[in-house]
Image (cartoon, grey):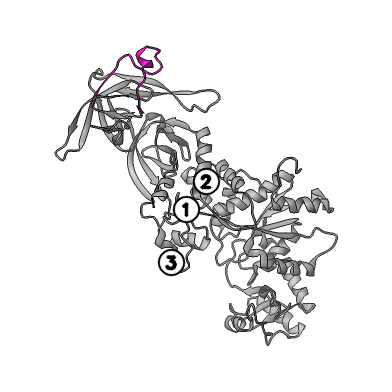
Amino acid sequence: MSTEEKSLNFIEQIIEEDLKSGLSKDKLRFRFPPEPNGYLHVGHASAICLNFGLGIDYQAPVNLRFDDTNPAKEEQEYVDAIKRDIEWLGFKWANECYASDYFQQLYDWAVEFVKKGKAYVDSQTSEEMAKQKGTPTQPGTDSPFRNRSVEENLDLLERMKNGEFPNGTHILRAKIDMAHNNMLMRDPIMYRILHSHHHRTGDQWCIYPMYDWAHGESDYLEQISHSFCTLEFLPHRELYDWFLDQVYDATKVRPKQREFARRNLSHTVVSKRKLLQLVEEKHVSGWDDPRMSTISGMRRRGYPPMAIRNFANTIGIAKRTNLIDVSLLEFCVREELNKSTHRVMAVLNPVKLVITNYPEGQEEWLEAENNPEEAVMTYRKVPFSKELYIEREDFQEEANKKFFRLTLGTEVRLKNAYIIKGESVIKDADGNITEIHCTYDTDSRSGSGTEASQRKVKGTIHWVSIKHAIPAEVRIYDRLFSHESPDGNKEIDFKEFINPNSLEIITGYVEPSLQSAKNLDQFQFQRLGYFCVDKDSSAEKLVFNKTVGLRDTWAKVEAKD
């Protein structure tokens, strides 16, 4: 990479400086290290784009390494979902690795720590440990077990590994400094006893390494050159380096941990614990509910992978945490879908339109363009007949001059079809309009080249032929939270801000070309927004999710508020 090609962010500057200082470019290796205890969310998407993007820019391998050190919360389902999400985003990993691949090596190193007097088995309760830990301004006090003999420590550690003790009775701690100003350096835990079935190693292990112990050593074993993580791990860097100091061989690459700021997204939560709460308490239908901030939720909603990558590139990398408005993500989604989706017609709030002078029983198949953004224009056929559905809001009996849709006595064009004129309405006993009657200009068909077809009218509306219309379930999604920072106030439960109107399910009618639409197929419903086929859809019952509107309507709502 060259600074002439683009301005570098601070992470790229770090890499460039290391290369200038003698690190061979063929030694560059990055990693993405998710914990398989939940589904990935939009924050992970940024980290994925960062690490795999660096791999692409520097033509360096990127490992996918699962931090599977807590079997009580980890499942194969999450491993599979994570792999699926990364592949869907368009990235390929060099090696699929697991912290559990290194359990034996980590344990062997731990034994060496004990032999060198750098680790000991502590038998205090967690409450006793918390008391002797000290505070940021007061030093901690030594554990009464800190000076156990090497022989006793080795014996206890072996028995811990063999499963002779119940959970919580012993831990292995690094022996560093109980008065250290960084509390993470006050004899941190390396191993805890956990009698839990592991999704890969089964019941082979009864002790499991802590993240701080396993992470840096896993980086070292994989010869990762740069280990990028979020800012909350900045205090952990000193411990990361201390652990490496104990095992580092100067002939190998020494991993370097550096931190970047989280990019929080408005109107969402990205804590896996809170996302799990939403799932378990049935506030959403699952991890892939289209209202969730998970990658699988965004995929099901119809967000294109390239839109998420463009969003990550747009917000970039920084050293300071800030809140990104979700409307920026939605802008990236619209921009991508505008280029790629076919335009089709659907009516979501239907009212019947009868063209009184159209011949009874006649139907036409009219030509409609698929996407004006296409380099080579393609077309489809849509059926037209005497009775149509139009949107109820596209008609008013009386309207002001700014209403450019159908009214009595005025003309509008039916998209791809004819110019019509409102003549009369039929109402039910409650005064609701049940039918609109109009006439059409027989010579005004779009694209026919006649003088009448080129006549200008102020409005164009979409429609669906009733005879050919296919009913569809349409799920209208809105933001899951009404507050821009739902978990920003520690005094208020984030669930208090759940938007009660985040999902509306309606029955709409779509043109027959959509009969064969498959899961995740994406369309622009003309004048309505972007929609995609949901996985619940079938040949017998089409189901569409609203991905995003044609424009940002929340900006107006929030401006009023």
Q: Choose between 196 and 449: the one closer to the eye.
A: 449
- Image coordinates of residue 386 in percent, x first then y, are 27, 23
| Residue bearing the label numbered 2 | 328
> With respect to residue 70, does 446 lie above or below?
above
Q: Earlier in the sequence, mark 1 or mark 2?
A: 1
In magenta stretch: residue 121:
no
* Residues at marks 1 and 2 touching, judged by CB atoms closer than 8 Å: no
Q: Earlier in the sequence, mark 3 or mark 1?
A: 1
For the point 75% across and 59% down, the residue is: 255
Q: Quadrant of residue 426?
A: top left
- Residue 517, percent across and down? 44, 35
For residue 193, say whether it is visible.
yes
Q: Secondary structure at mark 1?
A: loop
Measure the C-alpha gap from mark 1 to mark 2: 17 Å
Which stretch did the figure color magenta? 437-460
For label 1, the crowd category at 10 Å Cα-Cα, with few meaning under 14, some 14 to 19 and many 20 or more, is many
Q: Secondary structure at mark 2?
A: helix
Residue 438 falls inside the magenta stretch: yes
Give the camera-side residue of 512 and 508: 508
Q: Amino acid at mark 1?
A: Met
Q: Are marks 3 and 1 in contact (CB under 8 Å)?
A: no
Using the image, tell me which numbered label, if any, was put on residue 223. none
- Please determine whether, in this image, residue 296 is positioned above or below residue 122: above
- Frontmost of labels 1 and 2 is 2
Residue that label 1 marks? 292
Which amino acid, mark 2?
A: Leu
Looking at the image, residue 540 sits to the left or right of residue 434; the answer is right
Query: Quarter of the image holding residue 527?
Result: top left
The x, y position of residue 66, in whole percent, is 63, 58
> In this figure, which residue is indicated by the disc labeled 3?
492
